[in-house]
Image: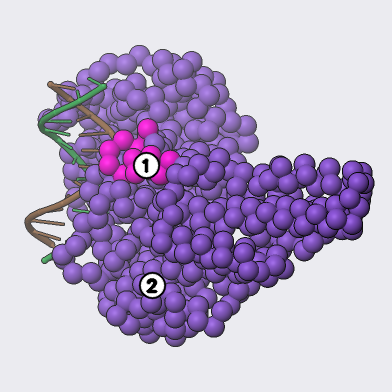
Chain colours: A purple, B brown, C green
DNA sequence: GAGTTTGAAACT
DNA sequence: CAGTTTCAAACTC
């Protein structure tokens, strides 16, 4: 329809003319192409890139060449390149600009490309068309009306292919208008030497493996220029990164980006069978963009839709170890972005410039993100340190006391001896005295073990005392701590070490356990909230997706583990807690009333 | 399918 | 280089 119109339009005039004349025959955009360029060859049509661009971007040429097929694909097609690069002769679109046409094996330097444009039709290529089942299918059919398909607005042009079968009007992006097209290519290249360069650059470690339609769409390559999305949250195809199925990177300057590794919104999108459920994807994307996903799920009512920009990043200190495909992200991105102690630096890129804090886009946000605060951890550690220190004091005091007693006994037994003898326990007095003097700083347990072996857990806890953060009395003791503290003293006076140690250990581990249980419970409450909202919308098909992208345990877990915000007495081992931690905290010490205590505290 | 929204590209 | 306009795809209704 339109095509015929566009098809007729230029050829008669411009077929053998330079572009300028072609423009003369047209009305509007001619002004732009009026730039007269004397570049010797068209970058397209097998020509060279404008000379001016060569020196500066020489290093880009190779990728440009090598990724000829990728160009068209990655930029505008949602489909991904498959490894196989066999050509598909039936393809209707033709590669114009890719030097591969000349020397498919050796990436030719642009400067040595033949000047004469090879007929673009000489070779078709497999590109975005990606005829899945072998069906020749045009990848994209542009609908350009005003650009004459000679600007990057046009997907075909940008991809370096002729329009063929498109719905464009006044199309000059065809063989008949090669001259005009070449001019346009030159002009475009002049304006932006990288214009035809693949927008998606692979990271050094290769992108092939990540290009797969991985469920998470997790991909390593990144957009060369980066996107500048403002409203789409980078979760719609408006976003070039999203469209190319890659994560936004530090190159992006997007706002409120949700296309980063660990993004709940993004994971919610991809965890569904996105290949089969486009409607779901779109719905999810909308929900994500409006903030419905994440802490509140898809179906949250219009109220409370907007999320605070910082929210997603605040808790990223806690990495969820379950994240499946994120290893490379952790290595590649998170490590550089999330200094463990600088939580406050995390929230940057969501609002505004991602480049500055770029990689933090990829931080992961745990369900416990809002629950665990640094001071909580400090408090817990402080408690443990106090206990550990107290244990040391008790140990020292105990030994001191026993020493004195022994001494006294000996003095009474050997009034004038004056000679220190080896103690019955095998410790010389001198050594012992030194050890005692060393006091609390000595926790290697070497001699302690003679009296009673310290459990690894206790030893580990004691080691924390070495940490200067906690040695200072920075963290005031809470009531519970004081209570236990006093209890420890009481124990000291009435009980032997063999009784004290287990008690101390029990207290310490109980504290740890309780603290962790609190976190678990809070996290589960939050998870329940999310899942219930998700359920509200998806009612089934996608309900195995939790808001943070972790699979729910199973459908049985969908029923509320909590009522009124209180955990059931025996919640299943939460899946969003580090299993090791949970095991250490909850399984080693398992007092019968543990859960009840937690409930009461909550 | 028409109208709107969006963000890249083009332009000033 | 920043701001604005143009453009076509994506999206919504």
Residue drawn at point x = 65 percent, y = 47 percent: A440
Q: CA distance from mark 2 to mark 1?
A: 29 Å
Label 1: few (<14), some (14–19) or many (≥20) C-alpha neighbours in 10 Å: few
A453 or A67: which is nearer to us? Answer: A453
- The reply to whether the magenta stretch includes residue A350 is yes
User: Where is A299 relative to A160, above or below?
Assistant: below
Residue placed under numbered mark 2 in the picture: A601
Residue drawn at point x = 91 percent, y = 52 percent: A414
* Spot occupied by residue C5 in the image (x, y as percentages of width and height): 10, 32
- The quadrant holding residue A160 is top left
Residue placed under numbered mark 1 in the picture: A344
Name the chain letter of the residue that bears numbered label 2.
Answer: A
* Spot occupied by residue A198 in the image (x, y as percentages of width and height): 44, 37
A205 or A118: which is nearer to us? Answer: A205
Give the extent of the magenta segment.
A342-356
Q: Could you tell me which quadrant the N terminus of chain A lies in?
A: bottom left
Label 2: few (<14), some (14–19) or many (≥20) C-alpha neighbours in 10 Å: few
A410 or A573: which is nearer to us? Answer: A410
Name the chain letter of the residue that bears numbered label 1.
Answer: A
Q: Main secondary structure of the magenta part?
A: loop
* Spot occupied by residue A35 in the image (x, y as percentages of width and height): 25, 18
Q: Earlier in the sequence, mark 2 or mark 1?
A: 1
- The quadrant holding residue A305 is bottom left
Residue drawn at point x = 89 percent, y = 57 percent: A413
């Amino acid at each position: 329809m339109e095509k015929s119109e566009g098809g007729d339009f230029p050829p008669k005039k411009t077929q053998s003319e330079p572009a300028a004349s072609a423009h003369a025959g047209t009305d509007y955009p001619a002004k732009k192409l009026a730039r007269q360029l004397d570049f010797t060859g068209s970058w397209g049509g097998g020509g060279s890139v404008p000379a001016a661009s060569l020196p500066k971007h020489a290093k880009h040429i190779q990728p440009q060449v090598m990724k000829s097929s990728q160009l068209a694909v990655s930029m505008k097609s949602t489909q991904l390149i498959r490894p196989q690069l066999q050509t598909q002769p039936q393809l209707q679109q033709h590669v114009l600009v890719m030097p591969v046409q000349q020397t498919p094996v050796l990436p030719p330097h642009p400067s040595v490309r033949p000047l004469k444009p090879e007929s673009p039709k000489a070779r078709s290529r497999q590109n975005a068309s990606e005829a899945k089942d072998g069906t020749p299918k045009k990848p994209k059919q542009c609908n350009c009306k005003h650009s004459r398909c000679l600007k990057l607005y046009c997907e075909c042009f940008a991809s370096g292919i002729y329009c063929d079968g498109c719905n464009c009007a006044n199309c000059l992006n065809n063989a008949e208008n090669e001259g005009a097209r070449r001019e346009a290519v030159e002009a475009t290249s002049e304006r932006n030497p990288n214009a035809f360069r693949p927008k998606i650059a692979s990271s050094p470690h290769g992108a092939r493996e990540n290009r797969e339609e991985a469920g998470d769409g997790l991909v390593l390559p990144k957009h060369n220029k980066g996107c500048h999305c403002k409203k789409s949250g980078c979760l719609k195809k408006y976003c070039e990164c999203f469209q190319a199925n890659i994560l936004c990177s530090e190159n992006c300057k997007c706002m409120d980006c949700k296309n980063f590794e660990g993004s709940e919104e993004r994971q919610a999108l991809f965890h569904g069978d996105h290949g089969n459920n486009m409607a779901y994807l779109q719905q999810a994307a909308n929900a994500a963009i409006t903030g419905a996903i994440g802490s509140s799920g898809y179906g949250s009512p219009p109220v409370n839709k907007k999320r605070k920009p910082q929210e997603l990043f605040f808790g990223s200190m806690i990495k969820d170890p379950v994240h499946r495909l994120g290893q490379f992200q952790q290595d590649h991105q998170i490590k550089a972005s999330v200094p463990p102690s600088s939580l406050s630096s995390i929230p940057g890129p969501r609002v505004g410039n991602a480049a500055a804090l770029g990689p933090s886009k990829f931080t992961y946000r745990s369900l416990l993100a809002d629950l665990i605060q640094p001071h909580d951890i400090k408090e817990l550690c402080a408690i443990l340190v106090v206990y550990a220190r107290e244990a040391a004091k008790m140990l020292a005091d105990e030994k001191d006391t026993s020493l004195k007693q022994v001494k006294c006994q000996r003095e009474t037994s050997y009034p004038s001896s004056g000679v220190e003898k080896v103690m019955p326990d095998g410790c010389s007095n001198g050594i012992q005295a030194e050890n005692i003097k060393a006091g609390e700083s000595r926790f290697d347990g070497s001699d302690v073990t003679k009296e009673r072996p310290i459990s690894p857990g206790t030893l580990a806890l004691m080691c924390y005392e070495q940490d200067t953060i906690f040695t200072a009395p920075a963290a005031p003791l809470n009531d519970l701590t004081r209570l236990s503290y006093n209890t420890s003293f009481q124990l000291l006076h009435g009980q032997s070490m063999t009784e004290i140690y287990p008690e101390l250990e029990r207290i310490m581990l109980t504290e740890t356990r309780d603290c962790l249980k609190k976190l678990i419970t809070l996290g589960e409450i939050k998870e329940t909230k999310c899942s219930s909202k998700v359920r509200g919308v998806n009612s089934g098909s996608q309900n195995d997706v939790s808001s943070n992208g972790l699979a729910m345990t199973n459908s049985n877990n969908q029923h509320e583990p909590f009522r009124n915000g209180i955990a059931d007495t025996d919640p299943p081992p939460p899946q969003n807690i580090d299993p090791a931690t949970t095991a250490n905290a909850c399984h080693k010490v398992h007092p019968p009333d543990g859960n009840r205590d937690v409930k009461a505290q909550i």
